[in-house]
Image (spheres, helix red, strand yellow):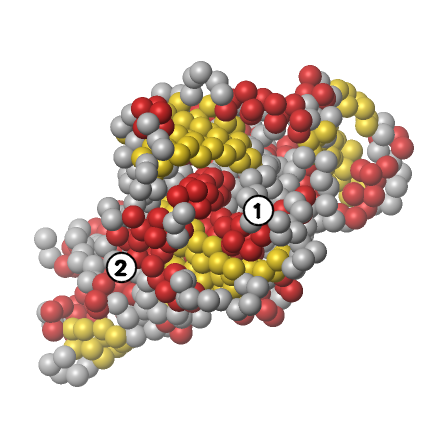
Amino acid sequence: MDKQRINVSRRDFLIQTTTLGAGFSLGLYLPLTGNAAFAAEKNATTVPEVNAWVVIKPDETVIIRIARSEMGQGTLTGLAQMVAEELECDWSRVTTEYPTPGQNLAREKIWQSFSTGGSQGIRGSHLYVRKGGAVARHMLIEAAANHWGVPMAECHVANGVITHSPSGRSTTYGKVAAAAAELFPPEQVELKDPKDWKLIGKPVKRLDTLDKLNGKQVYGADLTLPGMLNATIKACPVFGGTLKSFDDSKVRKMPGVRKVLRVGDNAVAVVANTWWQAKTALDALPIIWVEGPNSTLSSASISKMLDEGLTASEAFVGNKNGDVDKALRGAVKKVEATYAYPYQNHATMEPMNATARWTTDRCEVWCPTQNGEAALEATAAASGLPITKCDVYKLLLGGGFGRRGAIQDFVTQAVAIARQIPGTPVKLLWSREEDMQHGHYHPITKCKLVGGLDKQGELTGLHIRISGQSILAAVNPKWMKNGVDMITFQGFHPDGDHAISYTVPNLLVEHAMRNPPVPPGFWRGVNINQNAIYMECFLDELAHAAGKDPLAFRRKMMADHPKSLAVLNAVAEKAGWGKPAAKGVHRGLAVVKTFGSHVAACAEVSVDAKGKLRVHRIVAATDPGYAVNPQQIEAQVEGSFVYGLSALLYGECTIKGGAVEQSNFHDYPSMLIKEMPKVEVIVMPSGGFWGGIGEPTIAVAAPAVLNAIFAATGKRIRQFPLKHVDLRPV
């Protein structure tokens, strides 16, 4: 088949297989996000796509489509770097756009996963996005070679300029993009060797910074659409409770109020011209709730439930080797400790929100979501329409941390409201109080640890019993394995992305599942947060009991874990472990492997005579295998420490009368700028694997600080947050 025949066949094929809402059309139009969505829809100028990942305009603008969500972590820029690396385009001309999950479904999931969580944004899609760039590069070079009538092998490209080496003729991507769009993509492409990378591994500037600084960036809370109304909602404060009735006659005539609506079986919403009008009316609305059986639930009753799990006869096994009971019976010295970790709220800067427009034949949603596919499924389910008649337009997130991932309750509510006002876009924005008291919380757990030491002070046996909630049991039981939630054992697995960083001759790690009726969810770092505290702080206890240096004690058990040992050694060396610190300053260590990466930290703290804590410095090292953008990694480490230390210092959601007591940032605070330590980040990619960034690094800050506090005060802290603890030195 000659080249002309191939080109025409592809054109005919694409036109004939166009599908409703997206399709394989050459001029595929992807709806914009933000205020421009409707205005652009009627005036869109179609530009031929080279492939699903790359669109190049005649003015040389390179549009790279990003399926994953951007929530401040830098995934958008990192993925664009990876496509651009293989594309060999001019980075200064790169911009991005989101395809929609509806288009992905119509095109047989050509963009693959739209879910962004578990530090999977880059490590879960690096291969196929790089291939997308490489395929587009091949097609652009082929188009130029066809135009010149020369072999492709005689052409090369740099910064979006294609050159025919023998003749010196050149052209640009923008000039050949339309012709490239007519070609069939190659079945196989060769990706660059990492040693040849020019963009990957470089600290290039983020693509989303400018619009955030100049105010152009539109988040879900900012979105406005023609004719849009605003809504806010209130659900029964008691978990599992329902709505009995409300008296809308008290608020119907208040300024701007349009509708007072029942939403599902447990919530009521007010729709008004402005959000503040809606909130004012909702606050004044008389509501009668049916609180249900959970109205007596309290933090004390949950604590009692977890205590029972610590000594229960049955538990799920997550990791086991050797004979722990025998090792502990024969130990010269036995050390025991029980730790506890409270509920945490995600507390994103931007409360939950979504904007929906429903008609009898189409439902559209604009929302900040970590999981476009889950948002689309929620839209279809709530709309009563086939999924092919629904779509979701993603916006950048004002924080996610897992709250906007698997759980899309805010989308369900927005569609349910819009369905009662057909044809009118309605923006649902939760109040901060609603966001605080109706989250899906970091699970509550307790942990009992027992370790045995021999006469040389070496660890011979370790028994770890976790008692607490299973996230998967609540969110997606299908992901469990024979009833076991393996995510509970993050940092304790025998191997894999969440493997324990030590070799212990006799080890048993168990989980006694206890699920109070407070909904758990994925919270940045998930279970590694408390598991790292349990393991790393208890190892310090064991080292102290053995009379050994905490670094040396760890090193003894890490010979079979060289990459984890390398990051631990790196922070110890940079922090000056073994050398005198400044007067009154004390150090603590922590190391974990999780989400495929090896991370470690050394914290320096002081505690004065009145018990006032100051965290002076944290040296952190991370080995993610490959580092796409080192500057973004540094920012992620710093940001994760803000989040992790805020939880350690202040974070706690308590339960009274079946409801969360905290309501806003006055009683669920974040650490202040003046409290933030100096963070020194060591990025040390060893190559050969792809680890995560945003979630692994959060885990080491808290245990490193806690171990440093012990060094400063002689006190072991096993319950949190620290705001309840008297830190005055003993």
Residue 669 x/y as whole percent: 68, 50
Residue 122 visible in the current orientation = no
Residue 367 x/y as whole percent: 57, 46
> Which sits in the foreground, 258 or 551?
551
Residue drawn at point x = 14 percent, y = 59 percent: 3
Element marked by disc 1: loop
Please tell me in which quadrant of the rendered image residue 489 appears. top left
Closer mark to the observer between disc 2 and disc 1: 1
Reading the image, the residue beneath label 1 is 715
> Which sits in the foreground, 268 or 595?
595
Q: Is residue 621 above or below residue 666?
A: below
Cα separation, mark 2 vs mark 1, equals 37 Å
The kind of residue on which mark 1 rests is Lys
Residue drawn at point x = 32 percent, y = 38 percent: 455
**Count of labels in the image:** 2
In the drawing, does residue 558 fall left or right of residue 301?
left
Element marked by disc 2: loop
Residue 577 visible in the current orientation = yes
Kindly check if marks 2 and 1 are in contact, taking CB atoms under 8 A apart as contact: no
Residue 387 x/y as whole percent: 47, 33
Reading the image, the residue beneath label 2 is 686
> Which sits in the foreground, 466 or 121?
466
Q: Is residue 431 above or below residue 315?
A: below
The kind of residue on which mark 2 rests is Ser
